[in-house]
Image (cartoon, rainbow, N blue to C red):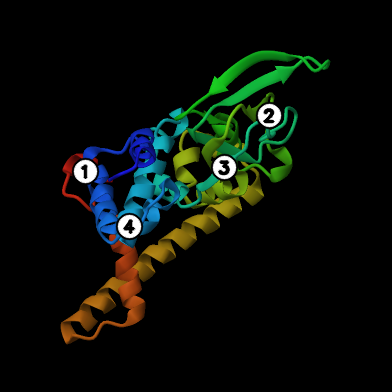
Amino acid sequence: MISKEVDLWLFRKGLPSNLKQVIMHFMIQKLKQKIDVGVDDILSILPSTHRKYIERFLRLAILKKVPMLQTKDVKMLKEICEHLQPVHYPEDICIIGEGERLSKMIFITNGTVQTYKTNGEGGRIGSKFLEKGDFYGSKELLNWASKLSSFDDLPISTRMVKPIMKVEAFVLSAEDLKNVVRKFWWHFTKDKDLTEFSEPVLEELALSTIKQIRRKAKKKQAIRSLNNQLAMGRPSMNLQRVVSRAMWDQLPSPVQSPAHSL
């Protein structure tokens, strides 16, 4: 018998029916083996391919709600997904303080967070509440990262951010975001005048471009070499890893459902 907590977890995550079926299938198998599975263990019981797919599905769904990311390349969003870290915040802890540098974005997946300004006398002004699917700090940090600014120029939070209950969230650090932007810089600078950037920044962009070209050339060479070795019936472990990574980039749904292919 699947517990109510598991049913609630599946509902909160907003998974499509085909992915719910995958999870239920493996949970039923565990129950037949008389192994209890709690909500914290749901993804851990899945095979690696299924677990990674579902984790990425959940992360992509969150990122696509951010206006500045809605038109970005899927490969870039997948790269951001790799850096999203799940966190749990207890009630009433200060996540980000008013006047602090914004060193991270927060994406709420469960619970409620209150943001507000203070009046200098302990009072709260302009309270807003963030719930599942909401986020904080995305616009400010994306604008900062798109200019390839230094960490000394991190934006300042104009609001206090505190949970009013236990909160589950994903966090993206400013450092990880900047690394992704360096890798996919043309998605952020194509509408900008390059004369706005300093010479060191332009050099950094040029080096990034060269690295991307070399990486693509090496990948093509590796694939050609793999094809030759496959023809001989003895692929190396290194080339198998190359193909495995390429397959992961195009990973299909564990359950056949074109509508939910990522």
Give coordinates of residue 216: x percent, y percent: 37, 63
Name the residue: 70% across, 31% down.
Answer: 156
> Which sits in the foreground, 29 or 242?
29
Q: Which mark is residue 88?
A: 3
Mark nearer the N terminus (2 vs 3): 3
Q: What residue sits 69% from the left and 44% below the top?
A: 151
Q: Residue at label 1?
A: 18
Query: Circle 4 sits in a helix, a strand or a loop, which is it?
Result: loop
Precedes in sequence: disc 3 or disc 4: 4
Q: Nearer the viewer, mark 2 or mark 3?
A: 3
Crowd rating for badge 3 (residues with CA inside 10 Å; few <14, some 14–19, many 20+): few
Q: Position of residue 116 (x, y in %)?
A: 67, 20
Element class at badge 1: helix
**Residue for point 44% across, 28% down:** 67
Check the image and report above or below for 36 versus 240. Answer: above
Type of residue at label 1? Asn
